Image: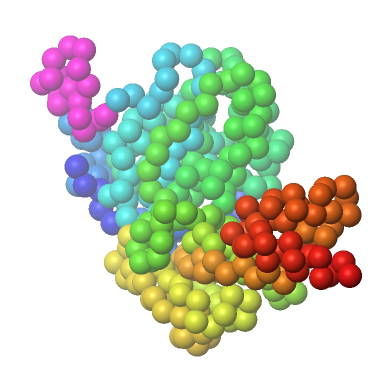
């Protein structure tokens, strides 16, 4: 069953509190130039909520008692008791919403959403009626609202947590809530789904065996430069979120800190109609994005090449270990084991440095 794609037009996004997020806000919107409000109100495949759920029910009946419909999937809830469920939502194309998300939205007693209006628009688009209590849950109220949601679960209610796009707690509200639930011995589970981090990583053409997610780069130039200087020797592939109007400055700062020829990819409007991936050296990408880009952006940057160890760079460490009480030969052997350098050369260099 395929859900229609998101629309592409529109820049402003309306929060549940009535304020507007402009395109490029650091809050992770995940839907390009269109908020959930820009979606139509038709249901999935032209079906409203009743049509979708009836279709799933008919499939379940055809399978017989005790079997679950493949379209509906296994229940997202763990048993009948109170619990908290983190659920991923589409990052662009509504067709990426799993069937289990539809069930979770329809069956939750409480739905905690980063933006309640966007969540309701998503539910309408998917043809799901949200019957549970709908509450806002965002970065500005997470600390005070987390214990309330934990209390709901402890009282036996099913609590569903969703962000505007992607997985809650990944550069979005959620991790404080999970911590509070764990501390309170309240069951927590997850309903996996779309992820801008993994989608960009897969498309980047860069190494995927080891990677790290660094979130948004700091806005202030000085802080941004210090952050990138600290990551210059990071050997894992790095993934960043960035606002479209700051992409050029961020790429230029990366080129300065990591080297102009460091490979990278700019992934824009992922899963949407105008999806684009630009790959190349950081300097080249910085020039391309100098005047900004449109839509939601994820940056993927290659890790640093391992530096060949040099004896002279590690002599001081050997001498310091010997001064702390180790035999010089033992200190040289220990440093050689961690750097791959010659124990004999380190020992002789340390002897010379002590003279």
- Residue 180 placed where, x, y %? 66, 29
The quarter of the picture where the N terminus appears is top left
Q: Is residue 161 above or below residue 351?
A: above
- Residue 297 placed where, x, y %? 47, 67
Q: Is residue 126 above or below residue 105?
A: below
Left-right relation of 139 to 209 = right
Total numbered labels: 0
Residue at far left of view: 62
Q: Is residue 64 above or below residue 40?
A: above
Left-right relation of 29 to 104 = right
Left-right relation of 185 to 84 = right
The quarter of the picture where the C terminus appears is bottom right
Q: Residue at x 72, y 56 (%)?
A: 332
The answer to whether one can see residue 348 in this image is yes
- Residue 92 placed where, x, y %? 37, 57
Dividing the picture into quadrants, the one containing residue 193 is: top left
The answer to whether one can see residue 6 in this image is no
Q: Residue at x 67, y 62 (%)?
A: 344
Q: Residue at x 69, y 53 (%)?
A: 333
Dividing the picture into quadrants, the one containing residue 78 is: top left
Span highlighted in magenta in the image: 57-73
Left-right relation of 312 to 104 = right
195 or 103: nearer the viewer = 195
183 or 173: nearer the viewer = 183
Q: Residue at x 82, y 48 (%)?
A: 326
As for residue 69 lying within the magenta part, the answer is yes
């Amino acid at each position: 069953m395929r859900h229609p794609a998101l629309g592409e037009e529109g820049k402003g996004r309306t929060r549940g509190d009535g304020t507007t997020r402009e395109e490029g806000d650091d809050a992770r919107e995940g839907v390009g130039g269109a908020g959930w409000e820009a979606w139509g109100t038709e249901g999935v495949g032209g079906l409203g909520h009743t049509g979708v759920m009836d279709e799933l029910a008919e499939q379940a009946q055809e399978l017989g008692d005790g079997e679950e419909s493949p379209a509906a999937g296994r229940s997202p809830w763990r048993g009948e008791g109170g619990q908290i469920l983190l659920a991923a939502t589409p990052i662009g194309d509504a067709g990426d919403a799993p069937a289990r998300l539809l069930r979770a939205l329809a069956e939750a007693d409480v739905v905690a959403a980063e933006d309640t209006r966007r969540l309701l628009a998503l539910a309408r688009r998917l043809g799901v009626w949200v019957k549970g209590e709908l509450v806002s849950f965002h970065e500005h109220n997470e600390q005070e609202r987390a214990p309330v949601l934990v209390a709901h679960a402890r009282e036996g209610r099913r609590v569903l947590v969703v962000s505007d796009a992607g997985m809650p707690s990944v550069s979005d509200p959620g991790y404080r809530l999970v911590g509070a639930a764990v501390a309170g011995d309240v069951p927590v589970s997850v309903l996996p789904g779309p992820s801008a981090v993994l989608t960009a990583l897969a498309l980047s053409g860069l190494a995927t065996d080891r990677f790290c997610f660094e979130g948004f780069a700091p806005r202030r130039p000085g802080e941004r430069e210090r952050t990138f200087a600290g990551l210059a020797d990071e050997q894992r592939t790095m993934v960043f979120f960035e606002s479209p109007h700051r992409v050029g400055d961020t790429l230029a700062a990366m080129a300065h800190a990591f080297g102009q020829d460091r490979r990278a990819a700019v992934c824009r409007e992922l899963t949407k109609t105008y999806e684009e991936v630009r790959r190349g050296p950081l300097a080249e990408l910085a020039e391309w994005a100098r005047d900004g880009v449109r839509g939601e952006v994820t940056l993927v940057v290659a890790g640093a090449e391992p530096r060949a160890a040099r004896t002279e760079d590690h002599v001081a460490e050997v001498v310091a270990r010997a001064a702390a009480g180790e035999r010089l030969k033992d200190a040289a052997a220990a440093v050689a084991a961690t750097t791959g350098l010659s124990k004999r050369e380190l020992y002789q260099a340390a002897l010379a440095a002590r003279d």
